Amino acid sequence: MTRVIRFHETGGPEQLQIDDLDIGEPGEGEVRIKVEAVGLNRAEAMYRAGKYPVQPQLPSLIGYEGVGTILSVGEDVTDYAPGDRVCVLPKISQGEYGIWADEAIVATHMLLPAPEGLSAEQAAAIWMQYMTAYAVYEVANVGPNDAVIIPAASSSVGLAAIQLCNWAGAIPIAATRTSAKAEALRELGAAHVIATQEEDLVARVMEITKGVGARCAFDPVGGPYVDTLAQALAPRGILFVYGGLSGEPTPYPHWPMAFKGASMRGWVASEIWNHSQRFESARKTILAGIEKGKLSPVIARTFEGLESLPEANAYLESNQQIGKVVVRF
């Protein structure tokens, strides 16, 4: 029997419980791994709470990003072998597999070899954040002196976007609710920090850009504030919305977009990894960035043991963190 985290009802972190399960042996296109560490994501919290587009079939497995070592492989698996250290990517619908467990069955299409030289915490934290933030690099194609507004900048994806912007020579403008995290965000690479509850974001962006506006805004919050972000864009700018943390409907800010010829588009990391050529290009770029020291995952806090997952989730949802929350087993 294997200890596995599941939830039997939707709700808060307290719904996460340890069940003893016989997870069986890997089938076609699958491997069994010993889980070393997992990175927590807001999407998992929304899924557990019943607020994600995919509704859980209860009781549900959970967890789809981490690092581990392969214990056994399905009969048809030739790309991986027992003993290989691998990263698990969130390339599935939530609940299909779940790696918040001592050991887990996962599909091989979810795997990449773990980069050498990374700690368990770092290896568990790289792919979701950089593949998500890659929109500013690949789609917006930001370059020297392009301003990029990054709401929720203290999140792992926000910090990944800051690093990608700096690597491209762009100007990352961190947006955060209060000035409490401003100093930390500057130390982590933000060229400017705007406390949105204390300052006029549009006025500050126009001051920073000398009236031009931002090349793009990369927003996980959504809701009515997208109208403000749209007003801060440059002509033909792009407003990315990659999440719905506000919990409110996200309107289309027609007039700010229309007068600037700007665009608004949704974004999820699967837009990269569901297309093999784009995925391979992004994978190589991210690994090159890590090797050159341009990209380095920021770990907010590491929790220890399967039993700590409810506490780790509560910490994630408290908004205290700056960077990725990781649980090491």
Image (cartoon, grey):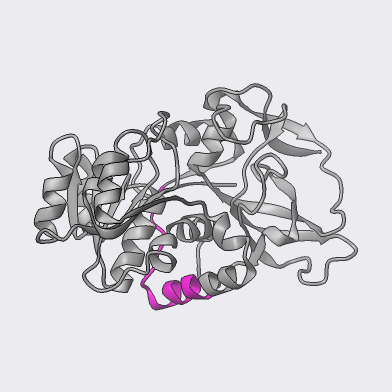
Task: Please state, as top left, top right, bottom left or bottom right, where the N terminus lies in the image.
Answer: top right
Left or right: residue 147 compared with residue 283 = left
Image location of residue 262, percent across then percent down: 31, 55
Q: Is residue 9 above or below residue 312?
A: above
The image quarter in which residue 200 lies: top left
Q: Residue at x 28, y 40 (%)?
A: 227
Q: Residue at x 29, y 72 (%)?
A: 143
Between 95 and 18, the one nearer to me in the picture = 95
Question: In the image as oriented, which residue stretches furthest toward the right?
Answer: 75
The image quarter in which residue 120 lies: bottom right
Image location of residue 136, percent across then percent down: 38, 62
Instruction: Give yes or no for residue 287 being in the magenta stretch.
Output: yes
The image quarter in which residue 85 lies: bottom right
Q: Residue at x 74, y 52 (%)?
A: 106
Q: Is residue 61 above or below residue 34?
A: above
Which stretch did the figure color magenta?
A: 284-300
